[in-house]
Amino acid sequence: MIIYSLVAMALGYVADMMFGDMFSAYSLSGYMEKAANFFKDKLRERYVSSHEGQTLAGSLLLALMVIIFIAPAVVLLILAYKLHPVVGVLIEGLYCFAAINEKKVNYYGTGILKALRKGKPLVARRKLMEMTGENTKGMREDEIVKLSVRGIAEYTFENAVAPLFFIFIGGGIGGLVYLVINRTAKAVRSEDIYFSLAARGMNDVLGYFPARFAAFLSVKDSRLLALDFMNAQKILKRDGKNLGNINASQTVAAFAGALDIEVVGNTYDDEPFIASQHIGDPKKEPDQSDIFYAQQISYGAVFIAAVVFMAVRLILGIIF
């Protein structure tokens, strides 16, 4: 069974690198987000607006999402393996393909870079908004580059290394469990803090090790790319916890250090500088090449992670 899951992981990774999430509106990830948005409104309204009521509502949402998407997937996979191991591997490979989403780094990063090079900032801002969900209206080119690097860094951890880690732990089902929790957390991130507590808390716990592993690999890959890996180590250590998302900030800090740019700058807004929001040092001005090199760091880190997880799976399969 370990070897079957290894083959499924390899199939899922290769399929993602070849095809990616081509039809995101109709992908499993897309349906998860739609379902979470639908049920969150229903549940939130049924419980009183108290800390306890909204915490319970958020917990029920997470449980409902897991039941709806994971239970049928488990049943289908069991039946597939009973029918024939090849059928089981193919179905599990589809699960892995659904969970991994590294290809979007190429899709969005390349799209933004081409738009900037052709002097089409409106197109670049639109693609950047699609990638990050941030308001990109009126952004200057240097701001577009900074947010692009940040988005690519977050994708590296959240959409690739973390799913690969949970596929390594629990096969295709493990990848889907992480995916449903992650998409539920995204759906409730702007909601009441107590309503979002269960999904965001579980997402932070599950992402703790993969985030740090992704950051570690990003630093190592920056050395292979002849980037400033010493600064990457420094910024990771200094600023690796400086965003509200303590997991995503790990890879963001590693990328910022490797590229010698400030990804998240000083925030004033009529308030004193908030040091916790600062990531990176402005050793140079951000330019278009930073997007390209951020993509290369991402590809390398994810590839190394995939190889490591598959190698360990193979060793365990041979032993057991």
Image (spheres, rainbow, N blue to C red):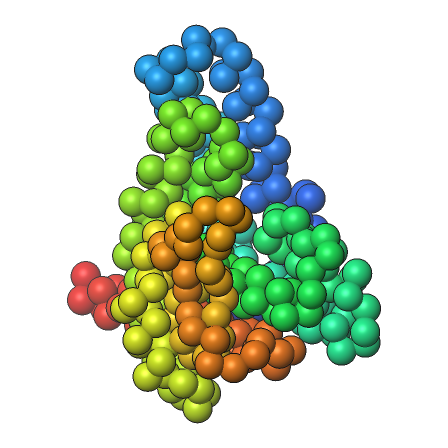
Q: Nearer the viewer, residue 196 or 312?
A: 196
Residue shown at the point (72%, 53%) measured from the top left: 137
**Residue at 69% over, 60% down:** 139
130 lies left or right of 172: right
Q: Is residue 86 visible?
A: no
Residue in front for this viewpoint, 144 or 44? 144
Position of the C terminus, as image quadrant, is bottom left
Residue 274 can be seen in this image: yes
Quadrant where the image shows the N terminus: bottom left
Residue 207: where, in percent of width, then height?
A: 34, 51
Q: Residue 178: which quarter of the image?
A: top left
Q: Give residue 33's quadrant in the image.
A: top right
Residue drawn 58% across the image and 76% down it:
286
Relative to residue 91, is residue 119 drawn left or right?
right
Q: Is residue 225 above or below residue 187?
A: below
Image position, residue 47 (x, y; %): 44, 10
Q: Quadrant of residue 249?
A: bottom left
Q: Position of residue 120 (x, y in %)?
A: 81, 68
Left or right, residue 301 beside residue 230: right
Residue 162, how many percent across, how many down? 39, 56
